[in-house]
Image (cartoon, grey):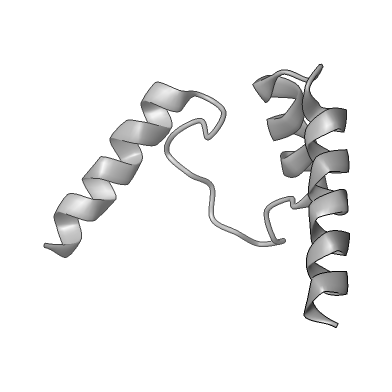
Amino acid sequence: MSDLVRDAIDRQYDLLVESSKDRNVEEIMNEIYHEYPDPPRMPLRDYDVHNRNQARTAILRKLRKKR
């Protein structure tokens, strides 16, 4: 049974890898943002999540506060 499940997982993984070869990172991220939007009534962020430099700075700032 475990071999059957492992084979099914491997096949699914191969399909996903094949289908994503021609896509760029921006397309994939936009799809994720569309599929998982922010919840309603979430407070606005003080940075642009789509700007990697602003997001990095905000994450580092948040990590520093917890230490």
- Vertical placement of residue 2 versus 36, above or below: below
Q: Residue at x 74, y 50 (%)?
A: 37
Q: Residue at x 84, y 30 (%)?
A: 18
From the viewer's side, name the closer residue of 24 and 9. Answer: 9
From the viewer's side, name the closer residue of 18 and 42. Answer: 18
Expressed as whole percent of the image width and height from the top left, the position of residue 27 reads 76, 24
Q: Residue 25 is drawn in which quadrant?
A: top right
Expressed as whole percent of the image width and height from the top left, the position of residue 56 reads 35, 33
- Vertical placement of residue 55 versus 60, above or below: above
From the viewer's side, name the closer residue of 31 and 22. Answer: 22
Q: Residue at x 88, y 41 (%)?
A: 15
Q: Quadrant of the N terminus?
A: bottom right
Q: Residue 41 is drawn in which quadrant?
A: bottom right
Q: Residue at x 84, y 61 (%)?
A: 7
- Vertical placement of residue 48 versus 37, above or below: above
19 lies left or right of 63? right
Number of numbered discs present?
Answer: 0
- Residue at the bottom extreme, as displayed: 1
Q: Residue 55 is drawn in which quadrant?
A: top left
- Residue at the left extreme, as displayed: 67
- Vertical placement of residue 19 versus 24, above or below: below
